[in-house]
Image: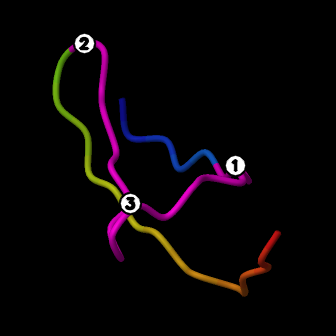
């Protein structure tokens, strides 16, 4: 508790949306989009 832990992930965008899930408890979430690429 009380920690800020940075992380980086690459996730799919489906229908213009990204889903975030938390397995246990509650969290505050901050997400920055830094770019995109297509297949």
- Is 16 on the left-hand or right-hand side of 24? right
**Residue extending furthest front?**
39
- Residue carrying label 1: 7
Q: Which mark is first along the chain, 3 or 1? A: 1
Q: Judge whether residue 38 is colored magenta.
A: no
Please report the residue visible at 30 percent of the width from the left and 33 percent of the height from the top. 21
- Mark 3 crowd level (few <14, some 14–19, many ≥20, 10 Å Cα): few
Foreground: disc 1 or disc 3: 3
Please report the residue visible at 61 percent of the width from the left and 45 percent of the height from the top. 5
Which secondary structure lies at badge 1? loop
- Is 27 on the left-hand or right-hand side of 10? left
Which secondary structure lies at badge 3? loop
Q: Which mark is first along the chain, 3 or 2? A: 3
Separation of marks 1 and 3 at Cα, in angstroms = 16 Å
Q: Which mark is first along the chain, 1 or 2? A: 1
Give above or below for 31 relative to 8: below
Please report the residue visible at 17 percent of the width from the left and 30 percent of the height from the top. 26
Foreground: disc 2 or disc 3: 3
- Using the image, tell me which numbered label, if any, was put on residue 24: 2
Dividing the picture into quadrants, the one containing residue 20 is top left
CB atoms of marks 2 and 3 within 8 Å: no
Q: For this rendering, which residue is in front, 30 or 18? A: 18
Give above or below for 37 relative to 19: below
- Using the image, tell me which numbered label, if any, was put on residue 18: 3
Separation of marks 2 and 1 at Cα, in angstroms = 18 Å
The region drawn magenta spans 6-24
Q: Is the magenta stretch mostly helix, strand or loop?
A: loop
């Amino acid at each position: 508790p009380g920690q800020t832990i940075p992380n980086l992930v690459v996730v799919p965008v489906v229908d213009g949306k990204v889903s975030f899930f938390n397995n246990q408890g509650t969290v505050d979430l901050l997400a920055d989009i830094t770019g995109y690429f297509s297949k």
